[in-house]
Image: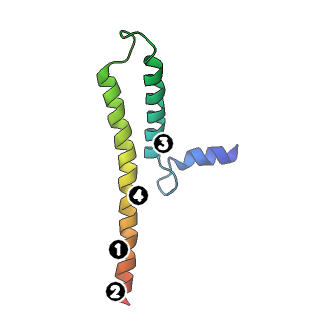
Amino acid sequence: MKQIINWIGGFFDSSNEKSSSKRLVGIAGAFTLFVTLYSNSHSEAHIAPSEALVWADVVVICTSLGLASVKEIGDMMNKIKGNNQTKTEE
């Protein structure tokens, strides 16, 4: 049980490189969107969520996952630049 709590807590720890709250929001949002769209595909048109609400959810998901990816790419670039600078100083 303690491992699960530590794993969930890792999403909110900024120093943790393996998990991030942005990924958690993106994945949970995408899963919720898929389930909602699938369940509403079998319902009547007047019960379905508004198109603006669906697109707003898509924007939040893409932004969350995109920010996580941009941060990861930026960290990789900094490591590469750091390695190149130490090689040129030697």
The residue wearing badge 1 is: 81
Q: Position of residue 47 (x, y in %)?
A: 39, 11
Q: Position of residue 44 (x, y in %)?
A: 40, 9
Q: Earlier in the sequence, mark 3 or mark 1?
A: 3
Image quarter where the C terminus lies is bottom left
**Which residue is drawn at the image coordinates 45% and 29% (left, top)?**
34
Q: Earlier in the sequence, mark 3 or mark 2?
A: 3
The residue carrying pointer 3 sits among few (fewer than 14), some (14 to 19) or many (20 or more) residues within 10 Å by Cα, namely some
Q: Is residue 73 above or below residue 88?
A: above
The residue wearing badge 4 is: 72
Q: Nearer the viewer, residue 6 or 51?
A: 51
Distance CA(mark 1)–CA(mark 2): 11 Å
Classify mark 2: helix, strand or loop.
Answer: helix
Q: Is residue 56 above or below residue 83?
A: above
- Which disc, if any, is residue 88? 2
The residue carrying pointer 4 sits among few (fewer than 14), some (14 to 19) or many (20 or more) residues within 10 Å by Cα, namely few
Q: Earlier in the sequence, mark 1 or mark 2?
A: 1
Q: Label 2 amino acid?
A: Thr
Distance CA(mark 2)–CA(mark 4): 25 Å
Q: Nearer the viewer, residue 51 or 43?
A: 43
Q: Give the residue furthest to the right.
A: 1
Quarter where residue 1 is shown: top right
The residue wearing badge 3 is: 24
Q: Is residue 84 above or below residue 89?
A: above
Q: Label 4 amino acid?
A: Glu
Q: Earlier in the sequence, mark 2 or mark 4?
A: 4
Q: Earlier in the sequence, mark 3 or mark 4?
A: 3
Q: Position of residue 12 (x, y in %)?
A: 50, 47
